[in-house]
Amino acid sequence: MKKFIKSDTGVVIVEATLIFPLTFLIVFLMVFAGNAYFQKSRVEGIVAKMTYYGAAQCSDPLLKEVVDKGAAGLTSDYEIQPYRYFLGEVGSGGGMNKIEESVKSQITKKINSMNTGVFSGMKPKIISIDCEYNNFFVYSTFCCEVSCEIKLPMKLPGMKKNISFITSCRYDVPVSDVPEFIRNVNMVEDWIETSEKASGIVDKAGEIMGKVSEWIN
């Protein structure tokens, strides 16, 4: 009995039966995970590029026409759309709803046209997508947030569904438009000068700030 227990006959076969499948499984998972992260980086690249493009469109309403037709193709028919940050449909964050929908549509189209990468069946599937222009008067931003699911073309033992990765990315780009900001400030100043009610509010605010300054000093 002792001799039988000390014998290592068959140990190699047992190790090979247990270790080799596990090793191959880990290797395959690493390879598939690498492709999943490759797909994730491609999605992030699309979202980042389109977010910057959306912010640029918000800053310059003629950008799309310049890109499509060139500067020489512009005529006096195109409008610069003054006060576009405030005017527009209700709930659109200003007059930027068309840009939001356009960027959202382009991101969706680009992600849906992606291939599967190195392995088949690993095409990103959009779960949610949101593009929004945020106006804070003093500054503004254009934000895009996208969530996708990337499935691995394999199942672990005992699993009914394929392994999947849920990836999310968000980009928030400032919208810089100094001329429009100056125009908006001038509009507010004109409104204050012509409105008695607004003037009263400003005078009251000035009085309060004066008292605060006296207290600080």
Image (cartoon, rainbow, N blue to C red):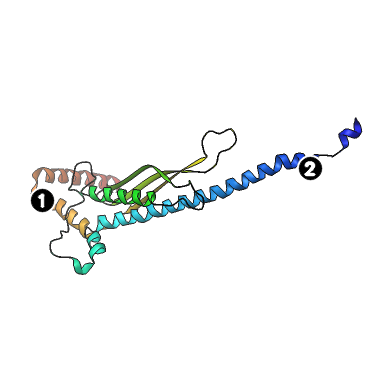
In the rendered image, residue 2, in percent from the top left (x then y), is placed at 91, 32
Q: Residue furthest bottom?
A: 72
Disc assigned to residue 12: 2
- Is label 1 in a helix, a strand or a loop? helix
Q: Is residue 86 left or right of residue 156?
A: left
In the rendered image, residue 138, in percent from the top left (x then y), is placed at 26, 51
**Distance Cα–Cα, label 1 vs label 2:** 92 Å
Count neighbours of disc 2 (C-alpha within 10 A) and say few if under 14, some if 14 to 19, many if 20 or more: few
Tell me the residue at 20%/49% (across/down): 95
At label 2, the amino acid type is: Val
Figure quadrant of the N terminus: top right
Residue picked out by circle 1: 193
191 vs 45, nearest the viewer: 45
199 vs 188, nearest the viewer: 188
Q: Is residue 84 left or right of residue 15?
A: left
> Do residues under tags 1 and 2 come within 8 Å of each other at their CB atoms?
no
In the rendered image, residue 153, in percent from the top left (x then y), is placed at 52, 43
Tell me the residue at 62%/48% (across/down): 27
Camera sees residue 135: no
